[in-house]
Amino acid sequence: MSKENQRDVIVNRLKSKGLRVTPQRFAVYANLCSRRDHPTVEQILKDLNQDFPISSQATVYTSLQALRKVGLVKEVLLEEGVSRYDANVEPHHHFHCRQCGSIKDVPWDTFDSFNLEHLPYLAESYEVTIRGLCDRCTGNN
């Protein structure tokens, strides 16, 4: 996909959710769409300010919250006190390497569906987090 087409796709997604297309929202969402590592606010800020400092942590956070609110971004909580963000909002699970900290998406259909009907409360959703060592850390790459 050309850069111009990518730009149009991002602009159309933002508009389709009723968001005003600001340079900050565009930059934050484009950055998230281009990566698979589930970055923190600080990692996104570092990327955006790499060539020319234009964003603050508050601006990135505000943009992420607006994107999250309309369903374009998911907040991923895999470690205590660390919020990460993901532009893949389709149902999926996560693998978290306990040694290097890498996070990988795990396809939703990897597991048979869980029967939530027998729980003593009303469950609305679930997501599995698998923890262990990635191929790189076990030397199996």
Image: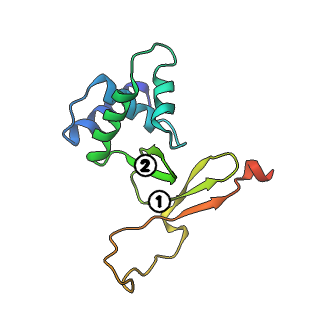
User: What colouring style does the render use?
Assistant: rainbow
- Is residue 33 found left or right of 59 in the rendered image? right
**Where, by quadrant of the figure, is residue 96 drawn?**
bottom right
Mark 1 lies on a secondary structure that is strand
Taking the spot 27% from the left edge, 37% from the top edge, the residue there is 14
* Residue 62 pos. (x, y %): 31, 34
Which labelled disc corresponds to residue 88? Answer: 2
Q: What residue does disc 1 label?
A: 92
- Is residue 102 found left or right of 77 in the rendered image? right
Which labelled disc corresponds to residue 73? Answer: none
Structural crowding at the residue carrying mark 2, measured as other residues with C-alpha within 10 Å and reported as few (<14), some (14–19) or many (≥20) = some
Mark 2 lies on a secondary structure that is loop
- Is residue 62 found left or right of 79 in the rendered image? left
Q: Is residue 6 visible?
A: no
Quarter of the figure with the N terminus: top left
Taking the spot 31% from the left edge, 23% from the top edge, the residue there is 23
Q: Residue furthest right?
A: 139
Q: Residue furthest front?
A: 81
Q: Is residue 96 above or below residue 38?
A: below
Q: Is residue 98 above or below residue 63?
A: below
Q: Are marks 2 and 1 in contact (CB under 8 Å)?
A: yes
Q: Residue furthest bottom?
A: 118
Structural crowding at the residue carrying mark 1, measured as other residues with C-alpha within 10 Å and reported as few (<14), some (14–19) or many (≥20) = some
